[in-house]
Amino acid sequence: MTVSNKKNHNGLTEEAQGDALVRIHTLYNQLTNTEKLVADYVLENEDVVYRSITEVASLSGAGYGSVVRFCKRLGYSGFQDLKIQLTKDLALRTAYHKDESNDPLTHLQEQCFEDLRNTAQMLTPELLEEAATALLEARNVLVVGFASSAITAKEIEYRLTRFGIQAVSVSDDQVQRMRAVSLAPEDVLFMVSFSGTTKRIISAGEVARQAGAKTMCLTNFAQSPVSELADIRLLTAVHIDPIRAEIVSRVPMAFVLDALFDQMLRQDEKTREILEKTFKTTADTYL
């Protein structure tokens, strides 16, 4: 298989040979509309590995050339090259799920490792720097999440506050919209949604975009409404059914946030000074 160990022109880290689906999720919002048709078909149909390029072009509604360009955009030499990687990925996931009943603890551990590895592939220094800069330069940061994502949103608020950044997290949908409408171009809306389809988060994002604020998201799905609304997209790569995702997704999300806040510390010395001050101020509460 022909895959470079360097970053391609899209900034995608390709040190690891797989996972093809991770690459699609990572680059989805950079694809053309016709390339997205191919991406959607590949993501939704495992039998793509048995299809010819002509069949995929027809079934996806895209042209032959769009399929070729899609493959090259991902860093593969062609459609056959992509199918080889998809076949390997499918075999690994099949074997992985067969072992689930034998040792649940080992299975969970391996799943966390796989999700973290795939998530790390979706982060680039450029992306982390862009996200860190947006937060460090923001006048105010509004963090929105719902249900389990509200817990993550609260964590983001806490950590930003420790850095001296004016941040607030909101889970109530009406309050989210009321606060979003008052945002300005120098403010940031940080959306947290594993599925990327939470209606109240989408609504807040739409309001914030209309207000001219910069938008960020933390989600597992690049081809989702929340991701489409975001100027900056922080993505996780959790391959699991929606019922269990709420629990397992927290580890990759925590990893992304750790990477982001570590970047902020490296990028701005004042942030470290403020962090030390806030720690000293609250140190007695931990005794």
Image (cartoon, helix red, strand yellow):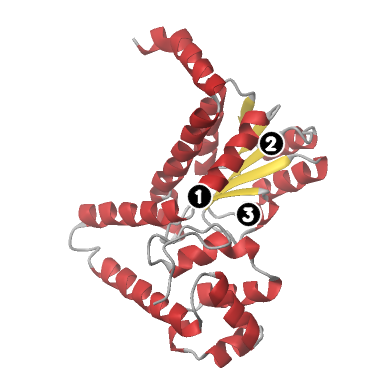
Q: Is residue 158 left or right of residue 69?
A: left
**Residues packed near mark 1 inside 10 Å, few (<14), some (14 to 19) or many (20 plus):** some
Q: Which mark is residue 259?
A: none
- The disc labelled 2 sits on which kind of residue? Val
Q: Which mark is residue 188?
A: 2
Q: CA distance from mark 1 to mark 3?
A: 17 Å
Going 71% across and 43% down the picture, which residue do you hit?
A: 204
Corner quadrant of residue 185: top right
Residue 260 in view here: yes
**Residues packed near mark 2 inside 10 Å, few (<14), some (14 to 19) or many (20 plus):** many
Q: Which quarter shows the N terminus?
A: bottom left
Q: CA distance from mark 3 to mark 2?
A: 15 Å
State the image coordinates of residue 45 (x, y, percent, origin top left). 50, 79
**Residues packed near mark 3 inside 10 Å, few (<14), some (14 to 19) or many (20 plus):** many
Q: Is residue 185 above or below residue 63?
A: above
First of labels 1, 3 by sequence position: 1
Going 44% across and 80% down the picture, which residue do you hit?
A: 81
State the image coordinates of residue 66 (x, y, percent, origin top left). 64, 81
Extreme residue toward the left, this view: 102
Front disc: 1 or 2: 1
Q: Is residue 38 above or below residue 179?
A: below
Going 58% across and 60% down the picture, which residue do you hit?
A: 10
- The disc labelled 3 sits on which kind of residue? Ser
Foreground residue among 58 and 259:
259
Q: Is residue 252 above or below residue 283?
A: below
Q: What residue is disc 3 on?
A: 227
State the image coordinates of residue 175 (x, y, percent, origin top left). 71, 34
First of labels 1, 2 by sequence position: 1
Q: Which mark is residue 124?
A: 1
First of labels 3, 2 by sequence position: 2
